[in-house]
Amino acid sequence: MTTTRIAPSLLSADFARLGDEVRAVIAAGADLIHFDVMDNHYVPNLTIGPLVCAAIKPHSTVPIDVHLMVKPVDRIIPDFAKAGAGIISFHPEATDHIDRTISLIRDCGCKAGLVFNPATPLAYLDYLIDKIDLILIMSVNPGFGGQAFIPQALIKIRDAHLRIVASGREILLEVDGGIKVDNIGAVARAGADTFVAGSAIFAGGDYAATIRAMREQIAAA
Ligand code: DX5
Ligand code: ZN
């Protein structure tokens, strides 16, 4: 059976109590901490950087899954590696040399992921799939939490799943944006194994109940 992972996005957490929030979602069953980095340039919002990643690191017993929505990408990668990132993912449109950026992430000792916006073709994987550890399919346009899931993402998740199977490699297939208890089953059926959820978990109040309900939907999918 495929291992599945729930990755709560801190974007919807209480930023005044981030350490507590990290410990609370891990106690509730989180497998990864999804850490959204926005720069008010590549996306129209501004969030958190390496200093905050380093600050939450001692509170986390699971890998920190850094989602870079920044342009340029390369300069900030070593900073996140030093700050304790386990996985670093970036958008191919945000760097001039995609292959070099992947190598840089891996040379820094982190797992490397490539992120696909709703309109970004999977063709970027053609000559790269042997070098990456994670594919992240965006099911919203990046920049904000709490947006509605874009159903066309399901087609792309299926296509990405087929590419991963054909590669014969262990590559996580993560989906990010608008994931709730009532659509996570469809996302799992399309082939995803790693599920980012921000507002669904943090706005729900009972983190453990939401994560348990999500796991039940995935198991039934
Ligand atoms: C959006 C971020 C997401 C966001 C998801 O650009 O990458 O990780 O926090 O939030 P929800 O689950 O509320 O759509
Ligand atoms: Zn994200």
Image: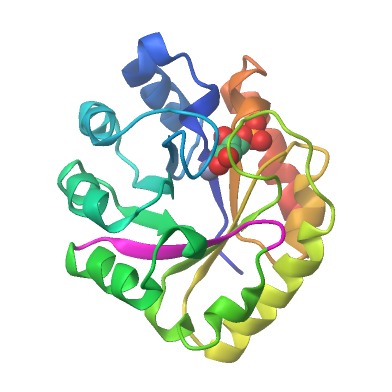
Image point (66%, 62%), residue name: 192
Name the quadrant where ligand 1 sits. top right
Determine which quarter of the picture holds residue 125.
bottom right
Q: Position of residue 99 (x, y in %)?
A: 36, 77
Left-right relation of 31 to 161: left
Structure colour scheme: rainbow
Can residue 197 be seen from the camera position used here? no
Q: Nearer the viewer, residue 55 or 169?
A: 55
Image point (19%, 41%), residue name: 83
**Vertical relation: 162 (above or below) 45:** below
Image point (40%, 47%), residue name: 65
Q: Position of residue 208 (x, y in %)?
A: 58, 26
Q: Give the position of the N terminus as an image quadrant.
A: bottom right
**Vertical relation: 138 (above or below) 33:** below
Q: Position of residue 147 (x, y in %)?
A: 73, 33
Is residue 91 one of those drawn in magenta?
A: no
Q: Give the position of the C terminus as an image quadrant.
A: bottom right
Left-right relation of 82 to 205: left
Provide the residue span drawn in magenta.
109-119
Outermost residue, left direction? 82
Number of numbered discs overlaid on the protein picture: 0
Can residue 165 be seen from the camera position used here? yes
Determine which quarter of the picture holds residue 106.
bottom left
Left-right relation of 142 to 109: right
Outermost residue, top direction? 16
Q: Nearer the viewer, residue 156 or 91?
A: 91
**Vertical relation: 50 (above or below) 73:** above
Image point (72%, 76%), residue name: 159
Q: Position of residue 193 (x, y in %)?
A: 61, 60
